[in-house]
Image (cartoon, grey):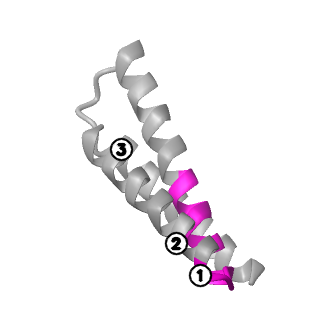
Amino acid sequence: MARGWESKSIEVQQDEASRRSAGSGHPATSQERARQQQRRTLELARARAAADLERATTDAHRAMLNRAIADLDDRLGRI
């Protein structure tokens, strides 16, 4: 199980590195950095909720996690 989490972490790190290198080369403004940090926080929260969903055993817990993931997806779509 830890191996899967490490793989996800490495994948997220690689995606983040590719996003940084794909930039236009200009330094990010404080607003851009804040938006990037907010996106990163939401992405991590979504990854955690998805991992918890895989282990959830009760219907109520699964439903709550599905709602949380849907909300996080919505918020990510608005950034």
Q: In which quarter of the image is residue 24?
A: top left
Residue at image coords 28%, 22%: 26
Residue at image coords 49%, 46%: 42
In percent of width and height, residue 8 lies at 57, 70
Q: Nearer the viewer, residue 75 or 2?
A: 75
Q: Which of 54 and 67 is in front in this view?
A: 67
The reply to whether the C-beta atoms of the residues labelled 1 and 2 are less than 8 Å apart is yes
Tell me the distance, in whole angstroms, between the alpha carbons under discs 1 and 3.
Answer: 24 Å
Q: Is residue 61 left or right of residue 76?
A: right
Tell me where the magenta segment starts and ends, as one range: 44-59
Residue position for label 3: 75
Numbered badge on residue 63: 2
Name the kind of residue labelled 3 in the image: Arg
Residue at image coords 43%, 51%: 72
Q: Nearer the viewer, residue 55 or 22?
A: 55
Look at the numbered disc 3 and give the secondary structure of its residue.
helix
Residue position for label 1: 59
The reply to whether the C-beta atoms of the residues labelled 1 and 3 are less than 8 Å apart is no
